[in-house]
Image: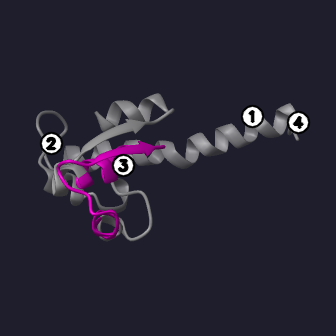
Amino acid sequence: MTLPQSENQSSSKDSALLYDWRIYSIRQALKQKGKATGALEIQDLLDLGHLDQYHYFGSQACDRAINYLSLNSNSRVLDIGSGVGGPARYISYKTGCQLQCVELRQDFSEIAQ
């Protein structure tokens, strides 16, 4: 089933608006911390809360996944739809595992890097 063109465009615009505020908010929060440029520590990102961990239960959910999957430095994880990379960074930091992230939105991918 295909939606009429006008509905597809509206949905795309609505989706962009839903996520664009997140990128703006991340940049503003880091700027307020004096971290607009330069190196970041994991705690700088964890302090962003739901902006960096855009899923239910934040880093606690990542801890559950780490334990459930027994992730460690020998593990390899594929994160599809990785957003700004919060869960991937956190899981890699906690376990030392290798993560490959895939994100279709260029702006999310850029801010993740």
Which residue is found at the position 41% from the left and 45% from the top? 79
When asked about the image quadrant of residue 63, the answer is bottom left
- Local crowd size for mark 1, using a 10 Å CA cut-off: few (<14), some (14–19), many (≥20): few
Task: Answer with left or right where residue 37 lies relative to residue 67.
Answer: left
Which quarter shows the N terminus?
Answer: top right
Magenta residues span: 63-91
Identify residue for label 3. 25
Disc 2 versus disc 4: nearer the observer: 4
Residue type, mark 2 in image:
Lys
Identify residue for label 1. 9
* Residue 61 percent location from the top left of the image: 36, 68
Alpha carbon distance from label 4 to label 1: 9 Å
Mark 1 or mark 4, which is nearer the start of the sequence?
A: 4
Residue 40 forms part of the magenta stretch: no
Which residue is found at the position 35% from the left and 57% from the top? 53
Identify residue for label 4. 4
Mark 1 or mark 2, which is nearer the start of the sequence?
A: 1
Q: Secondary structure at mark 1?
A: helix
Alpha carbon distance from label 2 to label 3: 13 Å
Residue type, mark 4 in image:
Pro
Q: Secondary structure at mark 4?
A: loop
Image marks 2 and 1: residues in contact by CB distance under 8 Å: no
* Residue 97 percent location from the top left of the image: 22, 47
Image marks 4 and 3: residues in contact by CB distance under 8 Å: no
* Residue 5 percent location from the top left of the image: 84, 31
Image marks 4 and 1: residues in contact by CB distance under 8 Å: no
Identify residue for label 2. 35
